[in-house]
Amino acid sequence: MKWLPIDKPNFNDYGGIVQPAFLYLPIITDEALGEFNQAVAPIEKALGQLCCWTSDLAVDLQNYLLGDYADKQVEKRKPIDTNTYFTISVAPDISVGLARYFNEETEWGQKQTQVRQEVTASMMGNV
């Protein structure tokens, strides 16, 4: 991004504002901010999912390890957006669906399947 902090050019005054000698702070426009927000949206979504899933696993672990010592188990998360922020668990019925989701519905899983097919096809051609 052009508007992220960069080495300061050779001047001490930028628009009447004296800046530190080591940093150049360009003016951020609405267009640049929109471009940045669009670029980081997938990262923000992925980090949100990762935080939720880590929390889900922590709850499962706590219930599994300490469930016999507590009066009740820790309640699992109930997401509003179940398509994006679905819950995960170590329970076998849920973990099978989770593996299927990552292997079939994500770009990573689809690419992995494509590579496997290409490798298999190339090995069959060499036999």
Image (cartoon, helix red, strand yellow):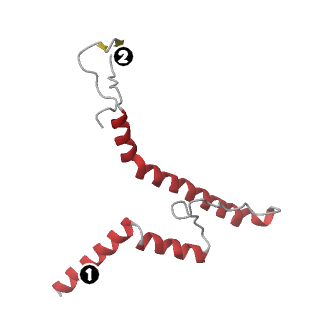
For the point 23% across and 16% down, which residue is it? 10
- Mark nearer the viewer, 1 or 2: 2
SS category of the residue bearing label 2? loop
The amino acid pointed to by label 2 is Pro
- Residue 31 on image: x %, y %: 34, 37
Sequence-wise, which precedes: disc 1 or disc 2?
2
Q: Circle 2 sits on which residue?
A: 20
- Residue 8 on image: x %, y %: 28, 22
The amino acid pointed to by label 1 is Thr
- Residue 79 on image: x %, y %: 61, 60
| Towards the viewer: 14 or 92 | 14
Q: Quadrant of the C terminus?
A: bottom left
Describe residue 103's horizontal placement relative to residue 26 as left or right. Answer: right
SS category of the residue bearing label 1? helix
For the point 46% across and 49% down, which residue is it? 44
Q: Quadrant of residue 125?
A: bottom left
Asked if disc 1 and disc 2 are in contact, CB closer than 8 Å, the reply is no
Q: Circle 1 sits on which residue?
A: 120
Disc ID at residue 85: none
Describe residue 17's horizontal placement relative to residue 74 as left or right. Answer: left
For the point 80% across and 61% down, which residue is it? 70
**How far is disc 1 from disc 2 in space, using C-alphas?**
58 Å
Give the number of callouts. Answer: 2
Badge 2: few (under 14), some or many (20 or more) residues near its Cα, within 10 Å? few
Relative to 52, is 98 above or below?
A: below
Relative to 48, is 124 above or below?
A: below
Relative to 58, is 89 above or below?
A: below
- Residue 58 on image: x %, y %: 63, 58
